[in-house]
Image (spheres, rainbow, N blue to C red):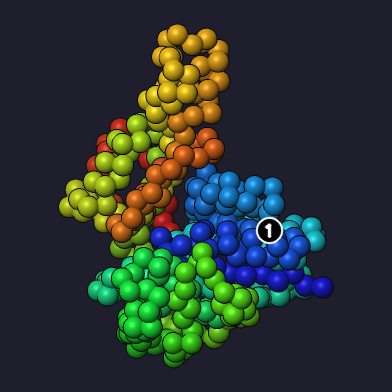
Amino acid sequence: MQVKIDLITGLLGSGKTTFIIRYVERFLREGKRVCILANDYGAISVDRALLTEALGEKCDVEMVTAGDWDCYRRRFRTKLISMGMLGYDRVIVEPSGVFDTDDFFNILNDSPIDRWYALGNILCMVDAHMPDQKDDTWKYLFASEAANAGLLIVSRAQELPGFPSAKSSGDLCARILAVLKEGAERYRLSRNFQKEDILIADWDRLTEDEWEKILKAGYRSGDMRKLSAAEDGSFQTLFYYHISRPASEVRAIVHALLTEENKYGKVIRVKGFFHAPEEAEAEEAEATGESLKACDSVRAEERKEEEGWYEVNATAENTEIKPTSFRKEVMIIVGERLNRKEVGEAFGETRSVTYYDV
C-alpha cells in the first residue's frame, strides 16, 4: 500500500508550522503513524525544532538541508526512500520559504519514489492580515504557492474585526480572490480560483465539516509562467548564532528590524531561539527567595540550564516571544535586499551565513 504524502505550502509567516501541528494531531488521534519532512537551508532547522517541541515523541520529524537545488533534490529523494521503508501512514512535507511545486511533482514521479508514495493533499496557508498592496515579486510567489493547492486555508482569521460574521469572511475571501486573479492574469496561471477553494475559520475551533474539507482537499492543476524570484538577490535568509540577550532587548531589536527598512532592508520574518541569562537569574531568585550569590553554585548552574531559553517568532503584524525547552542559540532573519552588516550589528554579530530561499 502506498504512503500518502501531503505538501503544505504558503509564504513566509503564513502559519505553515502552526497548521501542521494541528494537522498531524488529527492523524495521531486516528492512530496513524506520521512523519514530517521539513526542508531548510541552514544547519539548524528552526521549524523542525518547533515541530519536535510541540509534538514530542508522538511524531517523527526529519529534515533535509541544502543550499542548491541539485544537492537538495538528491537528499530529498534519499530521505523519501528511507522513510518509505519505515511503514508510515502519512508523510507531510513542509517546504521552507519559497517552493516550486513542479519540483515536488517531478521527484514523486521518479522511480522508485512513484511506487511508494501517492500524493494526498496540497494545502496552501494564507495570512488573513496580508495587505492588499504588494510588490510584483510577492504576487508572483503567492500565485505560484497557491497554484496547485486543493484548498487555501486562512490563518489568524479570528483576529479580524467582525469575525466570524458572513460579511467579514466574505470581504476577506474577495480580497484573496482579487490578488489571485491579478497574479493569474499577469503570470498566465491556468487555474480560475473560486470562493469554495478558500477556507476561512478559527483553527482552534475547526468543525468536523471543516476538517472533512481539509482532509479531502486533494490537489489541482495550475500551470503558470515561471520566473526567477532571486534574479536580483532580493529574498535572503541570514543566520546568526550565539544570541544571548535579555528578552526585552531582543524584542526591541526585532521591532527595529521590522520597522526600519531604510537601515536593515525589508525584513519579513524573524524567528529563532535565544538564551536570556538575566531572566534566568531573576527566575532563580524569585523561585528561591534569595539571590543567586547565596545559592549553591552547582545547583544554580543546573537551574540556569533549565531557565532563560526563549523562542521568537515575529512578522510586521505580530511579535511573539515565549519560553521554550529548546536549547540552541540561532536567529533567522528573512527578507528582501537585507543589509547584512547592519542586521549583524543589531545582534552584536559580525558574521552571518546567507542562503537564498529560491
Q: Type of residue at label 1?
A: Cys
x%, y% of residue 325? 54, 38
Q: Quadrant of residue 195?
A: bottom left
Residue at 38%, 83% (x, y): give it.
166
- Residue 205 seen in the figure: yes
Q: Quadrant of residue 330?
A: top left
Q: Residues within 10 Å of mark 1 (few under 14, many from 20)?
A: many
Above or below, 195 relative to 149: below
Q: Residue furthest front?
A: 289
Closer-to-camera residue (343/199): 199
Q: Quadrant of the C terminus?
A: bottom left
- Residue 103 seen in the figure: no
x%, y% of residue 346? 27, 38
Tell me: 177 left or right of 48.
Answer: left
Closer-to-camera residue (261/178): 178
Closer-to-camera residue (129/343): 129
x%, y% of residue 165? 37, 79
Residue at 44%, 72% (x, y): give it.
154
Q: Residue furthest left?
A: 262
Q: Which residue does the numbered mark 1 point to in the structure image?
A: 35
Above or below, 42 relative to 287: below
Residue at 45%, 76% (x, y): give it.
200
Above or below, 335 relative to 214: above
Residue at 62%, 51% (x, y): give it.
55
- Secondary structure under tag 1 reads strand
